[in-house]
Image (tube, rainbow, N blue to C red):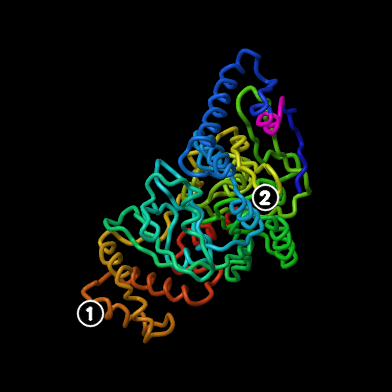
Amino acid sequence: MFKKIRERSLHFTILAFLTGLFLGVNLSFKAEALEPAHSYLDYFHQVYQIVRTEYVDTVETKNLFYGAIRGMLQALNDPFTRFLNEEDFAELKEETTGKFVGVGIEITVKDGAIVVISPINDTPAMKAGIKAGDKITKIDTSDLKDKSLPEIIKLIRGLPHTKVKLTVVREGFDDPITFDLERMPIKIDAVSYDVLKDHDTGYIKVKTFSSDTSREIEKALGDLNSRGIRRVIVDLRWNPGGLLDQAISMTELFLDKGKMIVSTRGREGTGNFKEYLADKPTLYKGGLVVLVNKGSASASEIFAGAIKDNRRGKLVGEKTFGKGSVQKSYNLNEKIGLALTIAKYYTPSGVSIHGKGIEPDFVVSSESFPEDDRKNVNAIYREKLVDAFLNTHKGYTPENRKEFMVFLKGHNLPISERSANYILKSEIYRFSKQPLFDLEFDSQLKKAIEVVGKES
């Protein structure tokens, strides 16, 4: 748990604001500013009474008020602020512990579209090939127009081992891509690590910032230190973020005491300003490179921004997602609540990355199909040709790679050898445990190895 080094006192808490709104007492505003709020609350009360007494069907009071709360929060036009009913509240608790049922994607609303922030490693979505930046246009047969983010999340989630079909539009592909996914209980192991033996480098993959992340990072670094590892690569690609306190605690392990990690600022005039400085002895002081991409968001960006701005290490990969807002959950009772955006965070250099992202020191694109291959690649996935091939061929062997090329040509869908090998290997991993890292197709990791060697 981190210590708050400096915190300017809040003029009023958010809870006091909400309470004041409904009681007509908000001491942070002058009395005359309250009159419009009183009027609107009178309108609300009148509409409620009319509906209760005149509407053609009997309605439940709970549904009316839940709907009103949702409408109020939707008026903020902030996809990260939402009402949490009993089901939503329980799901939020599951997510922060790293356990939930779904397909394993983090989504948001961006420019009116439902966009994948990141597929989560070793989940149905990742194994099926869903990528950060994919725009979801349909779930099963449901068009997503005019649906809220919580409604869409509910459509994706469901009972374990049931099926859901996601249709996405992907940049660079003319036709939509459809994925048939099986909902599974998702247990995210926040941290995995190993040693890149040929390079004498520790590799730490951080999948999410859940309640155990910083503790697991501390354990990994302790082990790597005991093995004499003096350079480390921290991989935050496809990490959609998570708990703010875990991002702070993890960053403290790499920075000297007193270094700025992040600051948060609320609405102007509220006095809601906090700075977080490293307050623990540095656990790891060796060479450091952080891998990021467009699926690195929120807490991932806090860590990456702190490392970059403090010149503690280098960032390699692609520009991050750009989610620079801070949410806080409030319990309205033991079963319902709301998640509210209360502040934006700023990197140590004072920059807000919300909607912008963080540029890495070394820009390296992820593996992608050449333009000449894309049309045929789309057809290969659509017609499930790899599944047919793997029914009679097992393993990623030199013989199978050659036969797969012949197989595709026989279906009049030839592609380059590298693209064919990438597809074959990726599909094989769908049905077996993926290795922690794979240098054959990971140009970003290769560059990170090169850079961290110069840093140590």
Q: Image quarter for residue 433?
A: bottom right
| Residue type at tag 1 | Gly
Provide the residue span drawn in magenta.
11-19
* Quadrant location of the C terminus in the rendered image: bottom right
Secondary structure category for the residue under label 2: loop
Query: N-terminal of the two: label 2 or label 1?
Result: 2
Residue carrying label 1: 410
Q: Is residue 10 above or below residue 256?
A: above
Residue 1's x, y, as percent?
76, 49
Q: Amino acid at mark 2?
A: Lys
Return the residue nearer the eye: 67 or 27.
Answer: 67
Which label number is shown at residue 335? 2
Is residue 293 found left or right of 219 in the rendered image?
left
What is the crowding at mark 2: few (fewer than 14 residues within 10 Å), some, or many (at least 20)? few
Q: Residue furthest bottom?
A: 392
Classify mark 1: helix, strand or loop: helix
Q: Nearer the viewer, residue 185 or 337?
A: 337
Q: Is residue 15 magenta?
A: yes
